[in-house]
Image (cartoon, rainbow, N blue to C red):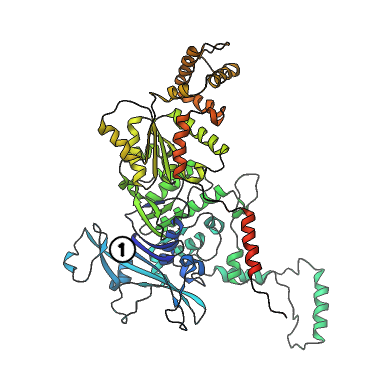
């Protein structure tokens, strides 16, 4: 079973969305774009337990809490506004096909659409396959003052006109869908609450029969009075006094002290899985182990479930990187890719992102109307798959998940420009820090590689900026840069080191070189104790910066400089970047408090009591 399409309307942060999937899918994008909402939507339609909750949805599951539309005619009741989620499933297995045969439709894999009535002649594999379309609708019921939801088959030929057949929980279990929420999953994964991973395993193996009855029977059989004989005179005295007021025809004792009055539902929440992680540690409740260990435990349970249902497991997993080291992140990603029928994952980690192919990676973006769209990273153009994997851990993913990419041609600029940016931000409160703006620096390694990265980021909807050295270029080569970058900045110098030496004061250059020498950080580079003449000082500074590109000497020079001492070319370029991400207008606390005070003052006086 695989999800081929999902449509979402009026659910949580998404007003509308239509997304297509082709097997495994990594969902990436900035915070609050709707990644978790998509996983929650899939769970609402496919999860066997979610819709059984009471209530299945709440006010804020509706987009902007909009679940009632004002009446069109004054005096009439408002109209409920529903949540609607539709999922198309393909690769239908035999068991599901037998149970749901009358509800099957046909899906065109190339055109990514359902066949309409009258297109039966086009239903030829492999381009056209059978599919199952499910709809979940959640709505507010004013009469009951409750939220209701149900999942139905979109194609219900045997139902009454205007009605659809409901999808049972038993059928949903056949889909094999599991949603593993970030952080929250681990806190109950090994509990026996309904829907927990351990509960799923026990249900799949049929190992729960009699569990609760036997546990309750043993608890009732515990005779704790034998272990506390000093209690018996007290209990008998209470029983005798009770007999003065309430007649009883029970032979013998009428009271008994039990260890518990737990029901089976209480037991589900109370029973705990204990484990020990070292020889000197006694077993502790699983929630008390480290978060990283807890997430690995979740992975172990996932592998168990996959082995129990090898033909049908669809995982949706939020941020598998939380609290686990990089090698475990990679193992989790590889597990999802190789041991599940289909996996949906959200992530901000380069170690996870690099394991998915560009064609498996969807980058979400949000419109001004809260509509969400997705673009395959492979469709962005500019980059080959090898480039994507090679640079995933080297700033590519950080830029992808932001709003802007500042692309430079080498390591020296990559280290030095962020220092200059931080200096500007510290000196000018009107600038929005680039980290907050979502603009990140990226080292393309060579000037010739810059256009392909600019094209890639620009196609993903990011603002793109270039900063590189001057050389003579034919018009067609220059056009590659102007097309790829929103701000194309070619400075007038033949190298970044030449820019620094030309535009920074000699006093600052000498203070930097003298500090290198006196601190011993100059290594094998010879720096005299006496300041050379100006011409020789420039040559010495240029040679020093060129000889240690990887040592970060240019960044160190900027670090020790005041803003006014930084190269004007660098600050002029960065100001263009800041102009693209203006800082939001702050509302002073005094003004905000004044507004509240004014509103209170303007309010009508309360009626006297």
Q: Give the quarter of the figure containing the C terminus.
A: bottom right
Q: Nearer the viewer, residue 312 or 25?
A: 25
Residue at x-position 20% and y-position 60%: 125
Q: Give the quarter of the figure containing the N terminus.
A: bottom left
Residue 49 shows up from this direction = no
Q: Nearer the viewer, residue 553 or 428?
A: 428
How far across and down, in percent of the image, does residue 203 sit?
A: 47, 65
Q: Nearer the viewer, residue 147 or 151?
A: 147
Residue at x-position 52% and y-position 33%: 419
Along the horizontal axis of the image, is 575 left or right of 175? Answer: right
Position of residue 68 relative to residue 431, above or below, is below
Most distant residue in the left direction: 121
Along the horizontal axis of the image, is 592 left or right of 189? Answer: right
How far across and down, in percent of the image, does residue 160 sit?
A: 32, 82
For label 1, the residue is 92
Q: Nearer the viewer, residue 459 or 357?
A: 459
How far across and down, in percent of the image, does residue 196 sit?
A: 51, 62
């Amino acid at each position: 079973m695989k999800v081929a399409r999902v449509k979402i309307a009026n659910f949580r942060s998404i007003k509308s969305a239509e997304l297509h999937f082709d097997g495994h899918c990594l969902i990436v994008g900035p915070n609050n774009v709707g990644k978790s909402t998509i996983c929650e939507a899939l769970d609402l339609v496919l999860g066997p337990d979610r819709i059984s909750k009471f209530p299945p949805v709440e006010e804020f599951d509706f987009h902007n809490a909009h679940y009632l539309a004002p009446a069109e005619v004054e005096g009439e009741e408002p109209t409920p506004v529903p949540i609607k989620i539709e999922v198309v499933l393909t690769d239908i297995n035999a068991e599901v096909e037998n149970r749901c045969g009358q509800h099957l439709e046909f899906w065109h894999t190339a055109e990514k659409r359902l066949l309409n009535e009258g297109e039966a002649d086009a239903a030829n594999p492999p381009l056209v396959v059978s599919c199952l379309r499910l709809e979940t609708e959640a709505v507010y019921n004013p009469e009951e003052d409750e939220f209701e939801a149900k999942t139905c088959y979109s194609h219900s030929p045997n139902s009454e006109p205007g009605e659809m057949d409901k999808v049972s929980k038993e059928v949903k279990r056949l889909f094999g869908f599991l949603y593993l929420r970030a952080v929250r999953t681990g806190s109950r994964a090994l509990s026996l609450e309904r829907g927990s991973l351990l509960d799923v395993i026990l249900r799949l193996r049929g190992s729960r029969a009699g569990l609760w009855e036997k546990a309750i029977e043993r608890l009732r059989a515990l005779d704790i009075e034998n272990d506390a004989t000093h209690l018996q005179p007290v209990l008998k005295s209470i029983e005798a006094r009770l007999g003065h007021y309430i007649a009883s025809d029970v032979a013998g004792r009428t009271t008994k002290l039990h260890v518990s009055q737990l029901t089976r539902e209480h037991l589900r929440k109370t029973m705990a899985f204990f484990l020990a992680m070292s020889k000197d540690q006694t077993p502790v409740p699983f929630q008390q182990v480290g978060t990283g260990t807890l997430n690995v435990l979740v992975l172990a349970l996932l592998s168990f479930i996959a082995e129990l249902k090898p033909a049908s497991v669809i995982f949706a997993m939020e941020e598998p990187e939380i609290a686990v080291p990089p090698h475990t992140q990679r193992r989790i990603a590889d597990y999802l890719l190789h041991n599940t029928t289909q996996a949906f994952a959200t992530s901000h980690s380069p170690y996870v992102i690099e394991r998915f192919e560009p064609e498996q990676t969807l980058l979400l973006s949000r419109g001004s109307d809260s509509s969400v769209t997705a673009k395959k990273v492979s469709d962005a153009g500019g980059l080959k798959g090898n480039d994507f994997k090679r640079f995933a851990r080297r700033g590519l993913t950080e830029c992808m998940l932001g709003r802007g990419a500042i692309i430079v041609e080498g390591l020296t600029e990559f280290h030095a420009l962020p220092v200059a940016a931080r200096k500007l931000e510290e000196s000018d409160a009107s600038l929005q820090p680039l980290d907050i703006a979502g603009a990140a620096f990226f080292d393309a390694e060579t000037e010739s590689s810059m256009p392909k990265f600019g094209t890639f980021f620009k196609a993903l909807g990011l603002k793109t900026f270039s900063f590189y050295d001057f050389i003579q270029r034919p018009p067609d080569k220059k056009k590659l840069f102007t097309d790829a970058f929103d701000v194309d900045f070619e400075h007038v110098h033949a190298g970044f080191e030449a820019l620094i030496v030309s535009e920074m004061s000699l006093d600052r250059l000498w203070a930097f070189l003298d500090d290198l020498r006196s601190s011993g950080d100059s290594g094998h580079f010879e720096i005299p104790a006496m300041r050379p003449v100006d011409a020789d000082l420039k040559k010495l500074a240029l040679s020093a910066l060129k000889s240690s590109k990887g040592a970060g000497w240019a960044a160190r020079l900027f670090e020790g400089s005041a803003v006014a001492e930084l190269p004007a070319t660098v600050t002029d370029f960065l100001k263009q970047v800041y102009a693209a991400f203006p800082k939001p207008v702050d509302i002073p606390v005094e003004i905000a408090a004044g507004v509240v005070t004014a509103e209170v003052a303007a309010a009508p006086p309360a009626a006297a009591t």
